[in-house]
């Protein structure tokens, strides 16, 4: 504890506070933790223009005085003089990003309203100028009612002016001022911040004005949501429309490889292993690589252009209605690629109940592993025809529409599950969050290509490890013991796997599932895509000579063997079922025990069973 005047640096994350702190204090810094909490305390000293020493503390970045994490709580307590072992600051230096002024001014207005002596450091003005934005600090000072100093902390520009202004402020406010603690409503502060930011603009390039105009649509509660749904709809249409040719090419290669092996090797276990197990099994999954790459092409484009963060902003309001914080959006978004990184990303959520809810609903986001399952069933049972605007490439395809509905079903299911969970087992208050909008920009082709290459490598590695191993094990269980040659007994029914499937099918038959689906669900616990390779292996082994000569695709065989209600029930099952051991394992690790993973498995399987049964019986009654 010293008798030196104490100045607190405060502001939003990424405003440049640390750079300004380093520029003012140089090497005269010390690090430690705040008393009672494991939050880093960064303090240092610098001198005013008259030589007086000043103590400076760099507070953790936050978006408001309503804390959602321990570091934000420390910032609030220090400013209000409630932090144990800390003095009330004599003055605040609020650091704002000049290129993102309207977002940063909202918190600045909240701080100014406290009544403490305050100076606003308009930081990174050089980057704002580079981006075509010129601001008038005098107008900004008049509107805010406090001094505003233009700074470029990394180049030590404006520091002398800041020191002079601090000297005058400390002399004028020799007595200690206690913050009023009065808070204004969030929406009112945001609107005022936008008005003040617009009034301070001297010059703005057309590109910035265009960005603002686009955001008025993209961030509108109604128009923005319609735009988001339209983009998702186009994405799923393209998954089918653009993938037909490459899928046909890969299918041809798989068929040719199977024919070559069959023509080279005599009939026996080795040929069956290579053709039925490896080529037909694993090859049936690799066929869907083009659709996965098309899906990720759109995701990478939306991220690179800056639109994805805007989608998060739009979804924040929806998630708040079901009791989730907006911080849950990014983990849930990551789960569209894979639930494992999505669940790990929940570490950024400070509220434990909020985080647990997000973990429990993450598997409901339709991950890329489900796409091969959806694609083979939709391709087999849903006609490839247009249902609206039926002229040329502008027609809305029925297959893409069904895929879109499956993804939306997963999202709606997740929101409803969150609503129930937040009112029962994970009951608690939810908090909002603020986010900064990046600039719109053209994606770099090399970044998109690299992202697609990495996704292709991940998928092929998965096909060569998890899917290959699961398929080989399944082939072995389907191949032994051997059925009598003239006994009239199906090899699948006679095998170990077939007998297990027949037993399991007693439970699954009421929802329309048959023996083959029951069998495919077991290895699909390793990875969802394995359901496709399992079905391909079953029908390859069970095909008679006449069927084998027809070289029919998996989709053609399914169309002959399954009624439409069964196929629809199978799709409904995969919307909800948590069939992935990796997801279960990472949930156990993140929740430090088996209680919540088992709860997640239980409630998701109940949802899957109910959804599949409801779909099957509804389709049956409808006469489909």
Image (tube, grey):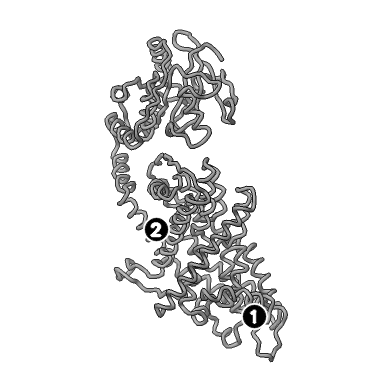
Q: Is residue 107 left or right of residue 271?
A: left
* Quarter-of-image position of residue 551: bottom right
Between circles 1 and 2, the one closer to the viewer is 1
Q: Residues within 10 Å of mark 2 (few under 14, many from 20)?
A: some
Residue beneath the point at 55% across and 63% down: 605
Q: Dot 1: what SS?
A: helix
The outermost residue toward the right is: 481
Q: Is residue 22 above or below residue 304?
A: above
Tally the marks. Answer: 2
Q: Is residue 106 visible?
A: yes
Whether residue 305 can be seen here:
no
Residue that protrudes farthest toward the bottom in the picture: 486
Q: Where is residue 275 in the image (x, y as percent from the top left)?
A: 63, 76
Closer to the chain start, of discs 1 and 2, is 2
User: Residue 492 shows which numbered tag?
Assistant: 1
Question: Outermost residue, front direction?
Answer: 424
Image side of residue 624 versus residue 204, left or right: right
Of the 4 image quadrants, the one containing the N terminus is: top right
Q: Position of residue 576 (x, y in %)?
A: 51, 62
Q: Do the residues labelled 1 and 2 touch (CB within 8 Å)?
A: no
Tell me which residue sits at (38%, 32%) in the image. 104
Please say if 398 is above or below 220: below
Residue at the image position 33 percent from the left and 50 percent from the top: 224
Residue 582 placement (x, y as % from top left): 61, 57
Q: How crowded is mark 1: few (under 14 residues within 10 Å), some or many (20 or more)?
A: many
Left or right, residue 356 beside residue 413? right
Task: Identify residue for label 2.
Answer: 232
Instruction: State the image coordinates of residue 80 (x, y, percent, origin top left).
Output: 45, 24
State the residue at coordinates (37%, 69%). 397
């Amino acid at each position: 504890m010293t008798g030196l005047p104490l100045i607190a640096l405060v502001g939003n994350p990424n405003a440049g506070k640390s750079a300004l702190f380093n520029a003012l204090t140089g090497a005269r810094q010390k690090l430690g933790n705040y008393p009672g909490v494991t939050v880093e305390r960064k303090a240092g000293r610098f001198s005013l223009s008259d030589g007086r020493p000043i103590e400076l503390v760099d507070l953790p970045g936050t978006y408001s005085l309503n804390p959602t994490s321990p570091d934000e709580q420390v910032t609030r307590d220090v400013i209000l003089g409630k932090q144990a072992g800390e003095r009330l600051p004599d003055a605040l230096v609020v650091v704002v990003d000049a290129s993102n002024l309207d977002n940063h001014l909202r918190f600045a207005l909240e701080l100014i309203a406290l009544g403490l002596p305050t100076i606003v450091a308009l930081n990174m003005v050089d980057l704002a100028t580079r981006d075509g934005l010129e601001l008038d600090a005098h107008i900004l000072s008049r509107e805010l009612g406090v001094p505003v100093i233009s700074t470029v902390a990394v180049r030590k520009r404006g520091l002398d002016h800041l020191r002079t202004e601090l000297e005058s402020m400390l002399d004028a406010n020799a007595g200690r001022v206690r913050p009023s603690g009065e808070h204004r409503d969030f929406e009112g502060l945001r609107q005022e911040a936008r008005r003040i930011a617009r009034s301070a603009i001297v010059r703005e390039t057309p590109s910035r004005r265009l960005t603002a105009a686009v955001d008025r649509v993209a961030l509108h509660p109604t128009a923005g949501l319609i735009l988001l749904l339209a983009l998702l709809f186009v994405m799923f249409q393209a998954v089918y429309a653009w993938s037909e040719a490459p899928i046909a090419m890969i299918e041809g290669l798989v068929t040719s490889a199977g024919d070559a092996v069959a023509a080279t090797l005599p009939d026996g276990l080795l040929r069956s292993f290579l053709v039925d197990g490896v080529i037909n099994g694993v090859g049936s999954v690799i066929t869907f690589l083009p659709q996965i790459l098309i899906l990720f092409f759109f995701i990478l484009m939306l991220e690179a252009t800056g639109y994805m963060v805007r989608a998060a902003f739009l979804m924040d309001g929806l998630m708040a209605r079901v009791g989730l914080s907006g911080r849950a959006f990014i983990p849930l978004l990551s789960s569209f690629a894979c639930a494992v990184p999505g669940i790990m990303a929940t570490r950024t959520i400070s509220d434990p109940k909020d985080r647990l809810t997000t973990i429990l609903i993450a598997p409901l986001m339709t991950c890329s592993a489900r796409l091969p399952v959806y694609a083979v069933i939709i391709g087999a049972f849903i006609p490839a025809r247009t249902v609206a605007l039926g002229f040329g490439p502008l027609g809305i395809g029925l297959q893409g529409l069904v895929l879109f509905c499956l993804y939306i079903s997963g999202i709606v299911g997740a929101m409803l599950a969150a609503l129930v969970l937040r009112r029962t087992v994970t009951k608690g208050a939810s908090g909002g969050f603020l986010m900064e909008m990046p600039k719109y920009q053209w994606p770099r082709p090399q970044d998109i290509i690299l992202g697609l290459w990495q996704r292709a490598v991940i998928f092929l590695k998965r096909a060569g490890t998890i899917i290959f191993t699961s398929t080989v094990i399944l082939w072995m269980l389907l191949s032994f013991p051997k059925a009598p040659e003239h006994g009239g007994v199906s090899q699948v029914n006679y095998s170990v796997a077939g007998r297990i499937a027949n037993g399991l099918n007693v439970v699954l038959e009421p929802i329309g599932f048959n023996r083959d689906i029951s069998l495919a669900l077991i290895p699909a616990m390793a990875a969802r895509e394995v359901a496709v390779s399992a079905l391909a292996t079953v029908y390859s082994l069970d095909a008679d000579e006449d069927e084998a000569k027809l070289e029919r695709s998996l989709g053609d065989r399914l169309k002959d063997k399954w009624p439409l209600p069964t196929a629809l029930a199978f799709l409904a099952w995969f919307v909800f079922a948590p069939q992935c051991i990796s997801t279960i394992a990472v949930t156990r690790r993140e929740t430090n025990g088996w209680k919540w993973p088992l709860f997640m498995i239980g409630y998701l399987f109940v949802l899957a069973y109910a959804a599949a049964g409801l779909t099957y019986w509804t389709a049956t009654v409808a006469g489909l």
